[in-house]
Amino acid sequence: MNEPLVIITIEALITVLVVLNAFAFATLWERKLLGRFQARYGPNRAGPVGYMQPLADLLKLVFKEDFVPEGANRVLFQIAPLISVITAVTAIAMIPFGDPIHVDGYTIQLVGANVSVGLLVLFALSGLATYALILGGWASGNKYSLLGAARSAAQLVSYEVAMGLSVVGVLMISRSMSLVDIVHGQESSTWYILLQPVGFIVFLVAAVAETNRPPFDLPEAESELVAGYHTEYAGMKFAMFQMGEYVSMMVISALGATLFLGGYLGPWLPGFVWLVIKIVVLLFLFIWMRATLPRLRYDQLMRFGWKLLLPIATANLVITAIVVAVFFQT
Amino acid sequence: MSVQDQIKGFGITFRTMVSRPLTLGYPEVKTPVFPRFRGRHQLWRYDDGLEKCVGCSLCVAACPADCIRVVAEENTPEHRVSAGERYARIYEINMSRCIFCGYCELACPFDAITLEHSYELSERERDLMVYTKDMLLTPAPKQPPLRTVGQRV
Amino acid sequence: MGERIFFAIAAFGVIASAVGVITLRNPFRAAVALIVSLLSVALIFLLERAPFVAMIQVIVYAGAVVVLFLFVIAYLGDKPPAVGPDPLARYQVLAWLVIIGLGIEGFLALGNSRLPGIRANPFQVSDIGSPRAIGRAFLDSFVAEFEGTSLVLLVAAIGAVLLARRAVLGERGR
């Protein structure tokens, strides 16, 4: 990265601002879409189409009392939502948004950091996000939170494995872990979803589980464990947990779009727009699953992850390896 | 839950998404009511202006929630209010106790009190929930629309 | 210059958090210190041009192993155990001797070694950090060790399943 520091700072600022706004409107879009799935309108009172609803929610949360429960561990209690947001927003740096643009003699990369192991960095960050759950659940000093946190951590660790395996097929085809190289690989051949359909489906299911979204949302299910690991969080800390969840949803959608749907490739619209369209499609799938599927019980969830998803991912890996080794050996 | 069932589920939600929502845009659109809907009470007069209510207190006896208060008074030739011998000097219904069962309407032999269609009866103060005779004599300002047979909403 | 700053941060982080792991009384805080230590080690790996190993360190160690540590600590509670006088207090002298001996040995070893990275002008040996090089190492040069390690892990996994099954069957029988 040979760009001057100013450009990097501006890029980072723009990215963070866009992502935070996207989070706000993603919450609104989810509520409206869920409403449509349920034969009702979503929020439509605050502003014409309800577009002021996120602002109203933000104001409400800001004015709530910012407390730390009595039996809680002060430092860890406050750090946990931070970890959630930091890991989610940092992951955006790995996603390529387009080919480099040339302006004024400068070459501006449209990716935060083109690391040679960009894919692994994303997995590492999502692995670190489990700490937000565990520390938050334990530091609340509340049995229900602790249970929710422990279950959630086990779930995340389990589905991380399946997600990693589902992606190795793509790695074998593209022969690089850098996301920029993977997009370029899809430029020269086809979108990898056509070459790795099973991988895509496993990735999608594992992604839903990784972000604690329904039907895998037992750790934060309102009716089961009060609210699981974020029971004791109110006001802005709760908002930060929500931010972490939605931003990580968007990051995983972006990752899925980059790995399987061609990233920023597409005819006659700028690359960034295509990537956003694909992210929106994947987010629609997330919300559709929330509206349709009943929640999995914890043992069903673990059984599904280990006994169904992992063998499928492994089989996909083996078959892909054989095909690549036999037919595409260079 | 088999895969076919799940796919059918996704179809149902998708079809619901693309069809019109069932939501009624209250308060801009009011929920329509059937003709025999029991809403706010109303006291009636004859065409010549005399009140139908004679203060017989049959509605008081019939009310299960005991929320009607009637004090009768003799009709004098100078001051004739109702069409019979007596009239109701005080007629109050406590709307916060009324259960809108319609027994008072059934009990009244003169069709003096009926339950009409107005259902927007909220007040900010409890004292305003006790309706006096003058309030009950005048019809409610806005009546909700009538529901027709087979109407969707 | 930037590398030196990062190295200073990473090295300090490793040592300070490692000290924290063994001195903090609250086990949860010790586990958090362990996380910081592992992340600092990952940073050092990055400085040594081994990004793959750095990320694997974070994913496996900091992302899964310490999570399991935290499970155990969470279920066992975080009150430090009530200990009486240390039963090994008499052997403190031996412990100090061992520490000093190891320290001297370490300095001697690092000072006299021919490791390329310790010279005044360290040079990169070859491409040893990339996934391609690691893959080749696993499958070409060190395939026996690789398979042996996976066999050990398989045995451990089977053992865990058997132990859990015995516990579950024992509960059901009751």
Image: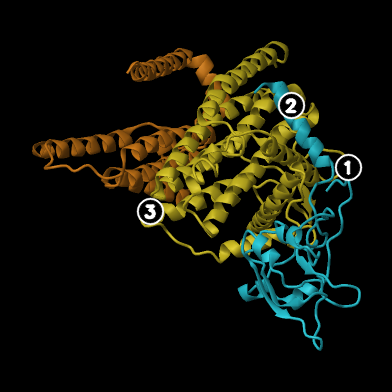
In the shown orientation, is residue B51 left or right of residue C147?
right
Q: Helix, strand or loop at disc 1?
A: loop
Q: Residue furthest bottom?
A: B78
Q: Residues within 10 Å of mark 3 (few under 14, many from 20)?
A: some
Q: Residue furthest right?
A: B47
The reply to whether discs 3 and 1 touch (Cβ–Cβ < 8 Å) is no
- The amino acid type found where label 1 is placed reads Trp
Which corner quadrant holds the N terminus of chain B?
A: top right
Q: Which residue is mark 2?
A: B7
Residue A116 rendering spot, x and y as whole percentages: 61, 36
Q: Is residue C153 above or below residue A161?
A: above
Q: Which shade is chain A?
A: yellow
- The amino acid type found where label 3 is placed reads Ala
Q: Which shade is chain C?
A: orange
In the shown orientation, is residue C86 left or right of residue C37?
left
Q: Which residue is mark 3?
A: A72
